Structure formats: C-alpha cells, structure tokens
Image: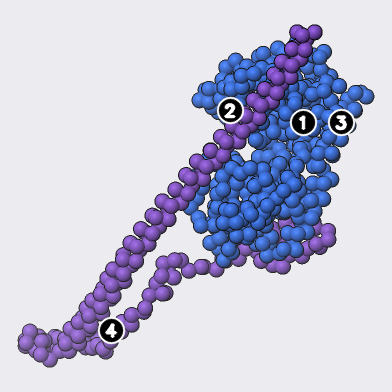
Amino acid sequence: MKVAFVVQRYGLEISGGAELHCRWVTEHMKKYWDVEVLTTRALDYISWENHYSGSDVLVNDIRVRRFSVAKPRDPERFGKIQNFVFENEHSEEDEIIWLKEEGPFSPDLIDYIKGHIDDYNYFIFFSYRYYHSYWGIQAVPHKSILVPTAEHDPVINLKIFKELFRKPRGIVFNSLEEKKMINTISGNENIPAEVVGVGAEVPEDIFSKQFCQKYGIKDNYVIYIGRIDKNKGCIELFDFFIRYKKETSSNIQLVLVGSTVLKIPIHPDIIYLGFLSEEEKFSALDKALLLLMPSFYESLSMVTNEAWALGKPVLANARCEVLKGQCERSSAGLYYKNYREFKEALMFFLGSSRLRSSMGKNGRKYFQDNYTWGTIEKKYLSLLKRLEKE
Amino acid sequence: MNDIKIDYDNINVPDIMKQIQADDVVFENSVPEESPSPEDNQASSEPSLQIPEPEYLPMVSSKKKRILLKLMKPFSPLIKLLILPVHQELRQTVHSLDYTNRRLDYTNKRLDSAVIRYGCLDITMEYVKLLHSLCHNIVVELTKLKIEEEGMRIKLRIIEKDFELLSRKEKALEKKVFK
C-alpha cells in the first residue's frame, strides 16, 4: 500500500506541532506501508518562505517531495484579513481569500496531488487549517484521511471548514474532545474515525542528577516545557506562580524549558533554561515534582504524554477541554480555572507525595495503554483496514 | 484548606476537583484575613517612640466665663489678663505645640532613615534587575546558538546521507559503464 503524508512543512529541523507529529507517524508507519511525504519548501511558519532547495530528497530514509510556495505570507495583510474574517460578517469567498493568505500557498503541491491520484492508495493530510489540506482534500476526497489537529480557537468556526470536515474518507483525531468538537460543528459522525493521538519515546539514558548539578537546581521544582508564549498561557502561569510564592512560604521553584517570545518576570524562583536537547529535557522532567501545562489551546499535548510516560502528574489549565478531559480519563492530573484552584491544587500536590506517586502511576498506565507507538500504529492500521473493507 | 478525601487506589479526579472547588467557595465567601502590608511590617519593626499625650487641664465653663467678663468689663483688659484663668489656655496651647513639634521631629527622623535604607535597597534592586536581564539575554543567546548548532548538525547529517547516496549512485553507474 502506498500512502502519502501531506503536511505544511517537513524536516528534521522542525521540532514541534503537527509537523513533528506527522514526521513521527510517517517514520513509524514506514515499516507497514510504502510512504512518501508531500510538503512545501518552507521552514518558517510565519512567512512560508522557500527554504529547502531539493525537491526530491530523503529524510531519515523517507522520500520527501517538496513543492515551492508561490507567494510567501505577508503578515500585515494576513493580519488585516484575519481580523476582518474573525470580527465581521463575511462570505465564504472572504474565507477562501483568508485561507490563501494564510498559506502555505503552493498550487504546485495541489497540482501534483491531482495529477497523481492513482499513484497512491491514501493521502493523509495533517492540520485542517492550512491551504494544502483544504485544497488537497477537495482534490482527492475519496482517498483522503484528515488528521485535523484542531484546537478550540476562532478558526474552527469558519464556514469553509464545516464542509471540509464532511469530505474526507476517514479522520484521525487526537483526542475525544477534538472529535466531539468537530462532530458538533460539522455533524460528520458518519465518517469513519479513530481517536489516535501521537506516541512518545522516552530516551534510555536519563541523567537527572547530573542535570540538576549542571544547572545548579535544587530537586524541589515544578516544570513547564514548551514555547514560552502568551497563547500558551504563560503570562497567567507567571502571575499565579508569583502570587502563590507570596501567599505561601513554599520554597518551590518553577523551571522553564523552551524558546521564549516573552520577557520572563524577574523572580529568584523562576529559572529559565532555554532550549534543551531531548535527553536534557527528559532529565529535567524526570526530576520535577510535576508538570504545569497552562495552555488554553491544545489538540493534544505531547509533553503531557511525556510527563505521564515518566510517571509525573500534571497540573493543567481547565479552560483547555482536551487537557481537562485527559486529566480526568487518566486520573493523573488536576486542573485549574482560576488562581484559587491553582493554589489549592498546587498546595495539595506539593503537600502529598502519595498523591503525586499515585497519579504518576496512573499516568504511566494511561500512557502505556494509549500512547505507545505500538498502540498508535495499530490504530492507524485498523482505520485503513476499515476503509479498505468499506 | 479543608481535608480532601481521596481513595488513592482509585483516584477520581472530578471528585477531587469538586472538593477543591468547594474549598474555593468557602474562600470566596469568607472574609480574607488582612495580611499586613510591607509598610505595616516596616512600621512594626521600627523602635517605638513614646510621645506623651498632652495633659488637658479642667477649664472654666464658657457660661461662667461670660458672666465674669460682663461684670468686670470696666476693668478689662487688665483684669482679664491678671485674674481670669487665661494661663490655662496658654499652657494648653504650649502643650499642643510641644507635642506637635515632637511628633514632627520623630516623623522626620523616620523619613530620613527610610530614605537612606530604601536608597540602598533601590540600588540593590537595580543590580538584581540588571543581573537578571543579563542572565535572560545570555540564556536567549545560548538557546539561539543551541538551536543553530542542532540545525547545523542535522544539515551535516543530511549532507552525509546525500553524499552516501551519491557514492552509491556513482558506484552503480561505474558498474554499468564498465559492463
């Protein structure tokens, strides 16, 4: 069976989001199918400027066909159109213009799909919100599988996507909450679907002691891993943590890992370590008391799964339905929707090592049952088997 | 915080959250205890200066004073000055003035010491801020370098693989040519 994975960007340099999700799935499904990746030459997700030169390359032994972006995104123009579409009454044509401006605008990629429909058994599209998925699915609806990676943000309410969600042959959701949201919006319950998500691999060598020595950190800390950004709820997290420190006499520290687009507040117990390698990231997570996940929008949090893989409990933002649902299903995390709940839950976690270890155990089990690569691979195989039978 | 009941063998997150949220309600409905502000703490740590309250002497009632003044009007203003208990009012005024002066002295002293102390504190805070900014910038720069290094390493790996592929191609072509 020949399967094409279609995604907005693809490369070893891209270290997060739907692109990494796609790469991991592709690399794991290689052993079952003849896989190829169809993508653009872009590396930067803001401008979509053509970056990669080769149009037909091997990445980790997977054939990757890259197509040029005909017009990079003009952020200013895009911002204006987006504001108009989100805040005013508008037509579907306006949304199509918005989609083209959002990009990555690569008609060559769509033409290739149209011209090679018979060469592939299935096309798996990642991220519903981009040009390649919308026009790609229109080109091959009967052979397309969509991995929406949808979040509860304003884009999901655009009219063009309501129709789009009814078009593909199959859908792979990241979580039950994402499935419920998309089913409600589009009424597409009849489309074959699986709730799959993405797996995680824990490195064999975790040197947590050495990590603490290297960075001079005491082992009494909570951790946030990810992009330090307003959209990820980091401003609220800083505010809550500083208030927590003021109101309690706790000696807990907050360790931040990831690239930042924010100025991190001055506080002796907020320690910013920047971007770390995978080994160091897992070492940091392994020594933490718990993971804080303040994000408002997530279709699936990879780092939450990684924390559970290591047996660490999670304190998540309850306003993100996916995180809240995952905490409840796994019995491995608490959540908060205001400062009081944050304070209570954190105090409760820090005061009870038994709670942390019980929840950690639950998290590990939840991860083993749902997010090991063996389970993920089986779910993809079973969906395609179902489609074949139909 | 009230005691939260948990069955550790069978953790029920919604149940725990309900208990936490119930605690929230208790918190919101109860009047929070006023925690002393830093200024209050500062004030309480100051050595207290005991300023005696001025003594207020019993005064002649105004009605009596009016009758006496009427009776002695012809001898006024001499009698007024010598006989009437005006000195009490004067004493009282002097007392008040003295008390006010001492309070002013005390406030000035506190102000001076606070200016000196907070002045030093300000400088220290500025140093801390500068050091923090420095650390922040260093971490950001190191992060950039780390990302760049990872990128370069990946590029190198890709080039190596391309090179291997080309070598294999070259060998295959050579074989075909020499056949």
Outermost residue toward the bottom in this view? B83
Camera-near label (1 vs 2) is: 1
The reply to whether label 3 and label 4 mark residues of one chain is no
Q: CA distance from mark 3 to mark 1?
A: 14 Å
Q: Secondary structure at mark 4?
A: loop
The reply to whether label 1 and label 2 mark residues of one chain is yes
**Mark toward the start of the polypeptide (2 vs 3):** 2
Are there few (<14), some (14-19), or many (20+) residues within 10 Å of tag 2?
few
Q: Which residue is mark 1?
A: A27
Q: Which residue is mark 4?
A: B54
Q: Is residue A31 above or below residue A276?
A: above
Q: Secondary structure at mark 1?
A: helix
Look at 27% across and 71% down and name the residue there: B108
Chain containing the residue with disc 3: A
- Tell me the purple chain: B
Q: Colour of chain A?
A: blue
Q: Secondary structure at mark 2?
A: loop
Q: Is residue B132 left or right of residue A174?
A: left
Q: Is residue B5 above or below residue A54?
A: below
Q: Nearer the viewer, residue A115 or A344?
A: A115
The amino acid on which the numbered mark 4 sits, given as a three-letter code, is: Pro
Q: Quadrant of the N terminus of chain B?
A: bottom right
Count of numbered tags? 4
Chain containing the residue with disc 4: B
The reply to whether label 3 and label 1 mark residues of one chain is yes
Rendering coords of residue A176 (x, y %): 79, 39
Q: Which residue is mark 2?
A: A44
Q: CA distance from mark 3 to mark 4?
A: 93 Å
